[in-house]
Image (cartoon, rainbow, N blue to C red):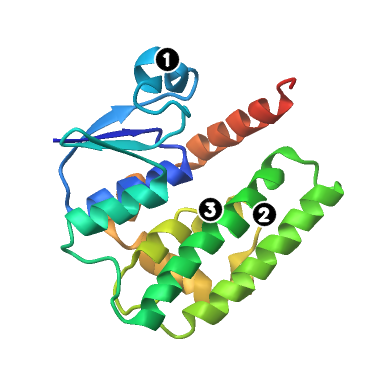
Amino acid sequence: MLKFYYAPLLPVARRVRLALLEKGIAFEPVLLSLDGDQLQPEFLEINPFHHVPVVVDDGFRIVESLAILDYLEAKYPTPTLLPTQPEALATVRMVEMVTANELFPQTIPLIYENEESPTFAQAKQHIDKVLEFFTQVLGDSPYFGSEQLTLADIVAGTVVPSLPRLGINLNDYPKLHDWCGRLMQREAWQKTDVSAEDFEQFKRKVRAFFSEPT
């Protein structure tokens, strides 16, 4: 059976868990606490970069969440989470990469920086730019690039719905607000939803990480 090493609080791990649930893939969960589990020798043998998540399927190891999603889609193609039409496929990939490179990194300063700092303001401005872009890309479609759920929705959908907890008002982006509502109606999103208490715990871990001396 597929083994899934993950920490529930991490958005990058949640995206893989969502894909596993949406596809109905049976898996053995291996929970990591991020209080040192990822630095233990037995885990470093699986991923020397000590990052989570990791999937091991029939002895084949995959690290990095986006690579894991591609693997799951290729090996377990039903239900499909990738469109085949070129423009739609490019849209899905684009949203995945913009989330990973432009959106998620900018959420971190909102957690550990003071609201009066220039870094905080710059991060919030950049997030607004991403949300405006996502609004244009989504258009009147229920999901990114398709009438059905895609990997883009899974990747962006682990970050955008949590933004109100970081002070970003999604009411300013009604199409994205409605899209988040559609996602939260899905069983997989409800099952993996991070509670307010757990989200505060995640924020504490982020602050502790950035306060550590280098």
Q: Residues within 10 Å of mark 2 (few under 14, many from 20)?
A: few
Secondary structure, mark 1, is loop
Q: Quadrant of residue 91?
A: bottom left
Q: Residue at x 28, y 77 (%)?
A: 84
Q: CA distance from mark 3 to mark 1?
A: 30 Å
Mark 2 or mark 3, earlier in chain: 3
Q: Which mark is residue 162?
A: 3
Taking the image as shown, residue 22 lies to the left or right of residue 9, namely left
Q: Quadrant of residue 140?
A: bottom left
Residue indicated by mark 2 = 167
Q: CA distance from mark 2 to mark 3?
A: 9 Å
Q: Where does residue 27 sit, x and y in percent of width and height?
A: 19, 39
Q: Quadrant of residue 209?
A: top right
Mark 3 or mark 1, earlier in chain: 1
Amino acid at dot 2: Gly
Q: Tally the numbered discs.
A: 3
Q: Residues within 10 Å of mark 1 (few under 14, many from 20)?
A: few
Q: Where does residue 201 sit, x and y in percent of width and height?
A: 54, 31
Placement of the C terminus among the 4 image quadrants: top right
Q: Residue at x 17, y 52 (%)?
A: 24
Q: Is residue 206 above or below residue 22?
A: above
Mark 1 or mark 2, earlier in chain: 1
Q: Which mark is residue 40?
A: 1
Amino acid at dot 1: Gln
Q: Is residue 42 visible?
A: yes
